[in-house]
Amino acid sequence: MREFARVLPELAIDEEVWKTAYELAMRARARGLTVPATDVVIAACAKRHDADLEAADSDFDRLVTVGGPVRRAARRTGFSRGELSVPDDFDVMGCTEIETMFGEER
C-alpha cells in the first residue's frame, strides 16, 4: 500500500467537492436513484479535479446520468512504469494468518 500511496495522487475534498456531491445526490434522488454516499463523494472529487475514474460497479454509471464524471478509457501515461511490482504470490499473501484470525483452518 505504501507503494500505491507514493505514486497515486491525493485529491483534496474541498468545498467545491462537497457542493458537487450534494448536487449529484439531489439529482440522483430526483430520478429515483439510490447511490451510496461514498460513491457520490468519489464521483464529485473526480469531477472536481478532472480525474479519470475507474470503477467496477454500476453506481458510477448511474451517476453519469445525472451529471457525474464520465468514465473515460484509461490513459496509460507510464508515470509509474517500473515503480511498482506485484509479487508472484500476491493472491495468497497472508492467507494463513487471515484464515487463523477467522477460525478457518486448511
Image (spheres, rainbow, N blue to C red):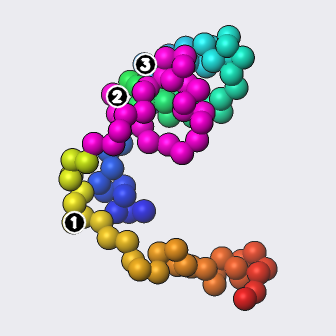
- Upstream in sequence: badge 2 or badge 3: 3
> Which residue appears farthest toward the right when viewing the image?
103
Give the class, few, some or many, for how many residues have Cα within 10 Å of label 2's Cα (few <14, many ≥20).
few
Q: Is residue 27 left or right of residue 8?
A: right
The numbered dot on residue 105 is none
Spatial separation of the CA atoms under disc 2 and disc 1: 26 Å
Q: Which residue is depicted at the point 58% across and 41% down?
A: 57
Taking the spot 27% from the left edge, 42% from the top edge, the residue there is 75
The three-letter amino acid code for the residue at tag 2 is His
- Asked if residue 20 lies left or right of residue 85, the reply is right
Q: Label 2 belongs to which residue?
A: 49
Quickly name the residue at label 1.
82
| Label placed on residue 16 | 3
Q: Earlier in the sequence, mark 2 or mark 1?
A: 2
- Secondary structure of the residue carrying numbered label 3: helix
| Mark 1 or mark 3, whichever is nearer to me | 1
CA separation in Å, label 1 and label 3: 35 Å
Does 62 lie within the magenta span? yes
* Secondary element at tag 1: loop
Residue 45 occupies which quadrant of the picture?
Answer: top left
Gap in angstroms between the C-alphas marked 2 and 3: 10 Å
Instruction: Please state, as top left, top right, bottom left or bottom right, where the C terminus lies in the image.
Output: bottom right
Q: Is residue 33 left or right of residue 50?
A: right
Residue at the image point whose x is 41% and y is 80% from the top: 88
Question: Where's residue 83, x and y in %?
Answer: 24, 64
Residue 76 in percent (x, y) is at: 25, 48
